[in-house]
């Protein structure tokens, strides 16, 4: 791949360089106003706790944590697999014991 193509694809991932070392060493603080405005709009403090929703929160975490969904899923897959085996193969040999 061409270096320019890689640079173009990664352009959205890498933030633009707002403050350069020459700007900081020159002492021009007024040119950093976009950077100051950006950081002043960010939320302050710790992140809010997310409310417990979904299957993981209801079953696998909290005071009602249980492994029963995993066991039920394993048994259901075994039952489904045995049913398919029986219908495809085993019922044909049921009455033909050798």
Image: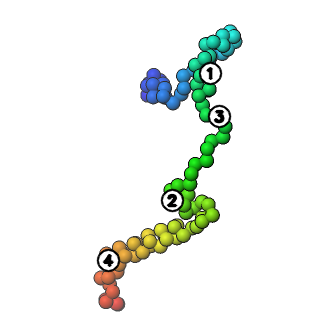
Give the residue at x 44% y 70%. 77
Q: CA distance from mark 3 to mark 1?
A: 14 Å
Mark 4 or mark 1: name the one nearer the start of the chain: 1
Seen in the picture, residue 88 relative to 69 is either above or below; the reply is: below
Marks 4 and 3 close (CB-CB < 8 Å): no
Q: Secondary structure at mark 2?
A: helix
Residue located beneath label 3 in the image:
44
Rendered location of residue 57, percent (x, y): 55, 57
**Residue 35 in sight from this viewpoint:** yes
Q: In the picture, which quadrant includes the C terminus?
A: bottom left
Q: CA distance from mark 4 to mark 3?
A: 62 Å
Q: CA distance from mark 2 to mark 1?
A: 41 Å
Q: Secondary structure at mark 1?
A: helix
Residue 60 vs residue 89, the one in the foreground: 60
Residue located beneath label 2 in the image:
55
Mark 2 or mark 1: name the one nearer the start of the chain: 1
Seen in the picture, residue 84 relative to 60 is either above or below; the reply is: below
Give the residue at x 39% y 72%. 80
Q: Secondary structure at mark 3?
A: loop
- Give the label, 4 or 3, closer to the camera: 3
- Give the label, 2 or 3, closer to the camera: 3
Left or right: 9, with 65 as reference point: left
């Amino acid at each position: 791949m061409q270096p320019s193509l890689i640079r173009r694809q990664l352009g959205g991932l890498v933030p633009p360089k707002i403050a350069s070392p020459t700007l900081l060493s020159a002492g021009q603080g007024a040119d950093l106003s976009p950077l100051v405005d950006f950081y002043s709009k960010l939320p302050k403090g710790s992140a809010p706790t997310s409310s417990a929703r979904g299957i993981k929160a209801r079953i696998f975490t909290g005071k009602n944590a249980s492994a029963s969904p995993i066991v039920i899923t394993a048994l259901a897959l075994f039952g489904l697999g045995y049913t398919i085996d029986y219908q495809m193969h085993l019922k044909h040999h049921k009455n033909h014991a050798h």
